[in-house]
């Protein structure tokens, strides 16, 4: 029977794309947000609390992952299709886990990474082909999508917020983002949206084939397949996070593009600030799409 409220230590099962089950465990809470991890469990049968793997965090190694723990924050009420398994007290190790990854509202697809990892180990060739086909389809959709700019935050204010990052000295993403989130959360909702619009535009301008050719070992090449559109986006995020001077240098000289660096958490800054100010999920679609291949002219 499913719990009426979410408690620390709760374990929930989710149906995976192939009909098997994966599980997630709740290990922390801040207001209405919950930190969960995806476990190693994957089986055709629902687990019980006796199953050891429901208390073991999944570490991903597919594509560009390198033994990364599958942790993320979820908001709001539990999805009706998630199955309550029981409660297992949060261990000292689990209490020490941290993450700045935000996954939106609860949804049964939350446990899918354990399925993706299984396919990476047991069905890699077909899995990689499907991912490539999906990326091609997404690119075709991007090519059809017009870019319509909306009102942006002025550059002085935008860069003053970005300047609060301490990329070199901070130990965790939370330390890097926290001052900027705090400052942006004290502005108006309109300002938060205009910050997101400015960020999207700056990432869009860096979305060029020449910049993609200069991100290091996973650079874009016409005859190689190790290029990751997501990694290129996160590399562009790092350029913005380094501040105005570095951004403008790289924008005008793609060969100065950061090598083998990324900063995905930048993408959650506006949503975190909005949630802190309003206590609910940030729902905003920018006029510019910052996903890789959106800047059509720069990829011709």
Image (tube, helix red, strand yellow):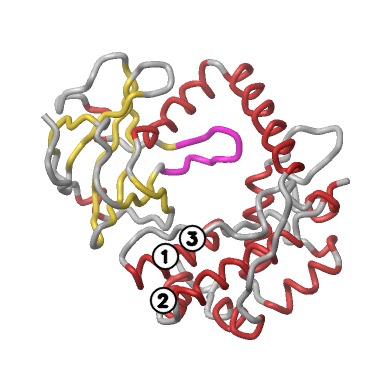
| Distance of label 3 from label 2 (alpha carbons) | 13 Å
Residue 239 in picture, x, y percent from top left: 68, 66
- Which residue sits at x=61%, y=77%? 153
Give SS at disc 2. helix
Residue 197 in picture, x, y percent from top left: 61, 67
Quadrant position of the N terminus in the picture: top left
**Location of residue 99 with respect to 62 vertically, above or below:** below
- Which residue sits at x=63%, y=46%? 230
Give SS at disc 1. helix
Which residues make up the magenta segment? 60-69
Does the residue at mark 1 contact the one at mark 2 (Cβ under 8 Å)? yes
Q: Mark 3, residues whose alpha carbon is within 10 Å: few (<14), some, or many (≥20)?
A: some
- Which residue sits at x=25%, y=40%? 25
State the mark number for residue 185: 2
Side of 96 relative to 253 (left or right): left
Give SS at disc 3. helix
Whether residue 54 is visible here, answered yes or no, is no
Q: Earlier in the sequence, mark 1 or mark 2?
A: 2
**Location of residue 172 with respect to 75 vertically, above or below:** below
Name the residue carrying label 3: 268
Q: Mark 1, residues whose alpha carbon is within 10 Å: few (<14), some, or many (≥20)?
A: many
| Distance of label 1 from label 3 (alpha carbons) | 6 Å
Name the residue carrying label 1: 272
**Location of residue 294 with respect to 141 vertically, above or below:** below
Does the residue at mark 1 contact the one at mark 3 (Cβ under 8 Å)? yes
Q: Mark 2, residues whose alpha carbon is within 10 Å: few (<14), some, or many (≥20)?
A: many
Whether residue 36 is visible here, answered yes or no, is yes
């Amino acid at each position: 029977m499913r719990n009426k409220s979410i408690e620390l230590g709760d374990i929930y099962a989710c149906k995976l794309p192939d009909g098997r089950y994966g599980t997630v465990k709740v290990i922390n809470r801040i207001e209405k947000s919950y930190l969960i991890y995806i476990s190693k469990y994957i089986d055709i049968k629902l687990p019980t609390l006796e199953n050891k793997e429901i208390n073991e965090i999944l570490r991903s190694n597919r594509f560009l992952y390198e033994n990364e723990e599958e942790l993320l924050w979820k908001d709001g009420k539990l999805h009706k299709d998630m199955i309550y398994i029981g409660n297992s007290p949060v261990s000292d190790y689990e209490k020490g886990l941290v993450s700045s990854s935000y996954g939106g509202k609860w949804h049964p697809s939350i446990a899918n990474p354990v399925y993706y990892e299984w396919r990476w180990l047991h069905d890699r060739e077909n899995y990689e082909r499907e991912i490539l086909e999906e990326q091609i389809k997404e690119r075709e959709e991007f090519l059809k999508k017009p870019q319509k700019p909306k009102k942006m935050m002025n550059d002085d204010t935008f860069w003053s917020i970005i300047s609060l990052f301490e990329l070199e000295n901070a130990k965790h993403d939370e330390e890097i983002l926290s001052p900027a989130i705090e400052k942006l959360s004290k502005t108006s909702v309109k300002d938060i949206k205009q910050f997101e619009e400015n960020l999207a535009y700056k990432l869009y301008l860096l979305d060029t084939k020449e910049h993609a050719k200069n991100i290091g070992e996973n650079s874009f090449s016409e005859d190689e397949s190790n290029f990751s559109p997501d990694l290129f986006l996160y590399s562009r995020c790092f350029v913005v996070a380094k501040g105005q001077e570095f951004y403008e240098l790289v924008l005008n000289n793609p060969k100065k593009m950061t090598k083998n660096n990324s900063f995905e958490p930048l993408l959650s800054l506006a949503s975190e600030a909005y949630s802190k100010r309003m206590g609910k999920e940030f729902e905003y679609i920018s006029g510019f799409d910052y996903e890789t291949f959106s800047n059509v002219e720069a990829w011709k």
